[in-house]
Amino acid sequence: MLHRIKLSHLFLMAAMVTIALATGGAWQFSEDIEALARALAPAWIGIALVYWVLWRQITPATPDTPNGLPPRPLTTDFAPLKLDMRYADIASLPLNRLEIVVVDTETTGLNTRKDNLIQVGAVRIVDGKLLKGDSFERLANPGRPIPANSQRFHGITDEMVAHAPAGGEILQEFLDYAGNAVLVGYNIAFDLAFMNRIGEIRNPTLDTMLLSVGAFPSRQDHSLEALADHFNEEIHSRHTALGDADATARIFLHLIPELDRAGARTFGDAQDLCAHSADRIRSLGPCD
């Protein structure tokens, strides 16, 4: 039963129990309830703050990743992010002043050289706000059967894409939707690798996984699920392009103040942080 309780809930319960025990101990020496409340108020606030700080810093360890490095992502080839390219028009802009399109894809498999796009989903962030009702979701015909194990993963079948446009047409529709916005995604290098095979992505990009590695260097689990749990966000329609893009967008908005505390306030800062995190992950070696 205990393993079903979220870590955040355990921290809350522990804080409440600590406060209750402190109150009970002090109650024995005071008959004036109002005086007792005034005396204990600073202690209650202090206990709550301590547990909040602990919750922000502590995360379950991942035993099979050495030296505090994050688990292996879908790809360690971060070249599609073009992190060495500088964008003078937005480099000094704060992250909450950017126009951002958060994107995710679903594919026939995990081989970025041989598999194909079958779905693209995206949402838009403007001035630090996720725009409701402003989204993009399209299915693409991969021109080949979708393997059964992939169908079980994302639920997209051959019948669902039989009459869908080809990937190139869908990609152009997405690029029209994105315009000049900064593209953000979770391990977005994976998505960009598929997109760049059928078109050229010129938009500036950021990766929430790499940003998380930079913002929380002591964390060992930077998975989408772990980040959503850390920020108390639910992932609706997991492993659909639009569902994962929406979750990634909400996580990115939570990351902005964390990045500010880490010294990454502008787009240029965030690029540099992504580059540093990419170096850390590449030190794990190539993905299998």
Image: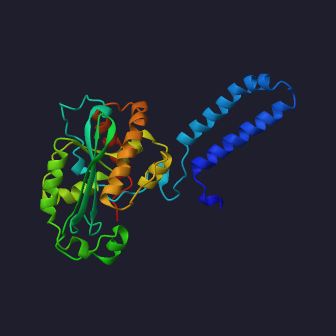
Residue positioned 36% across, 33% down in the render: 264
Q: Is residue 69 visible?
A: no
Quadrant housing residue 168: bottom left
Which x, y percent locates residue 100? 26, 41
How many marks on residues?
Answer: 0
What kind of colouring is applied to the model shown? rainbow
Quadrant housing residue 183: top left
Kindly give the residue lying farthest to the front in the view shown.
133
Which x, y percent locates residue 76? 31, 55
Quadrant housing residue 261: top left
Which x, y percent locates residue 29? 87, 28
Relative to 141, 260 lies left or right: right
Relative to 283, 268 lies left or right: left
Residue positioned 62% across, 38% down in the render: 51
Q: Quadrant of the N terminus?
A: bottom right
Q: Compare residues 44 and 196 and report the one nearer the observer.
A: 44
Q: Quadrant of the C terminus?
A: bottom left
Answer above or below: position of 116 versus 229: below
Which x, y percent locates residue 282? 34, 52
Q: Is residue 140 visible?
A: yes
Answer above or below: position of 35 versus 239: above
Residue positioned 63% across, 49% down in the render: 10
Answer above or below: position of 238 versus 32: below
Answer above or below: position of 59 versus 22: below
Relative to 202, 25 lies left or right: right
Relative to 234, 24 lies left or right: right
